[in-house]
Image (spheres, helix red, strand yellow):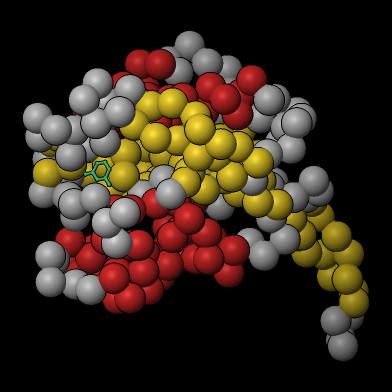
Amino acid sequence: MKVHVADHPLIAHKLTILRDERTDSPTFRRLVEELVTLLAYEATRDVRTHSVSITTPLTRTKGLKLAEPAPVVVPILRAGLGMLEGMSKLVPTAEVGFLGMVRDEKTLQASTYANRLPDDLSGRQVFVLDPMLATGGTLIAAFNYLINLGANDITAICILSAPEGIAAVEREFAGSKIPITIVTGALDERLNEHGYIVPGLGDAGDRLYGVV
Ligand code: URA
């Protein structure tokens, strides 16, 4: 498994405002969108392409275009929805599927409550959007779900990650032949006793959409 932790002053600047408890929801949403676009740039480094020949006003030349079928982008509901716009800006031709996962706040176990995905993801490259990689339970369940549908290349984009969560995903997929990559804006210190990332930013869904 590959893990890429962003190391860029613009990302650090935006993350600092995002973490601040005084940042309101509209600003939080805008920053998440901007951060995802920056992280997606790195996450799509190995996006599948094919070569094409084109004619410029001056000459024939070769170029690259995204391969077909297009990648599938899967935001994990609810907080991952706040990341979709930023990703779609960068890869507008991607197909979008939805996976609703909830974690039991006592056991921290993740379970699927909704999905809207193609029945067959055989051979597809998938980008999963989940802002907080905390215990890793949600990502592990989501990756297994997508692999069972046939996905054979998975990259997750996470705004923040905890070392415990990265280690759990690494353990789960250690023997997997499927390339798995995590691209994250920052690797935080730890999880607290409630499974929240510290220093973190609190509950990403609540900060994006309010407490419901
Ligand atoms: N989910 C969140 O929204 N925040 C955390 O810190 C952990 C999981």
Instruction: Pick the residue in front: 8 or 208.
Output: 208
Q: Is residue 136 left or right of residue 202?
A: right
Measuring from the top left, give residue 157's x and y in whole percent.
43, 47
Measuring from the top left, give residue 139's x and y in whole percent.
42, 32
Q: Quadrant of residue 212?
A: bottom left
Measuring from the top left, give residue 69's x and y in whole percent.
80, 46
Q: What residue do we see at 37% from left, 73% from top?
A: 30
Q: Is residue 109 above or below residue 46?
A: above
Q: Is residue 166 above or below residue 40?
A: above
Q: Can residue 38 be seen at all in this image of the molecule?
A: no
Tell me the quadrant of ligand 1.
top left
Residue extending farthest front: 212
Q: What residue do we see at 61% from left, 33% from top?
A: 153
Residue extending farthest bottom: 57
Q: Is residue 46 left or right of residue 9?
A: right
Q: Is residue 172 left or right of residue 164?
A: right
Q: Is residue 173 above or below residue 210?
A: above
Q: Is residue 161 left or right of residue 97?
A: left
Q: Quadrant of residue 130?
A: top left
Q: Quadrant of residue 87?
A: bottom right
Q: Can residue 117 be seen at all in this image of the molecule?
A: yes
Q: What residue do we see at 76% from left, 59% from top?
A: 65
How many numbered tags mark residues here? 0
Measuring from the top left, give residue 43's x and y in whole percent.
49, 50
- Quadrant for the N terminus, please: top left
Q: What residue do we see at 89% from left, 64% from top?
A: 53
Q: Is residue 62 above or below residue 113?
A: below
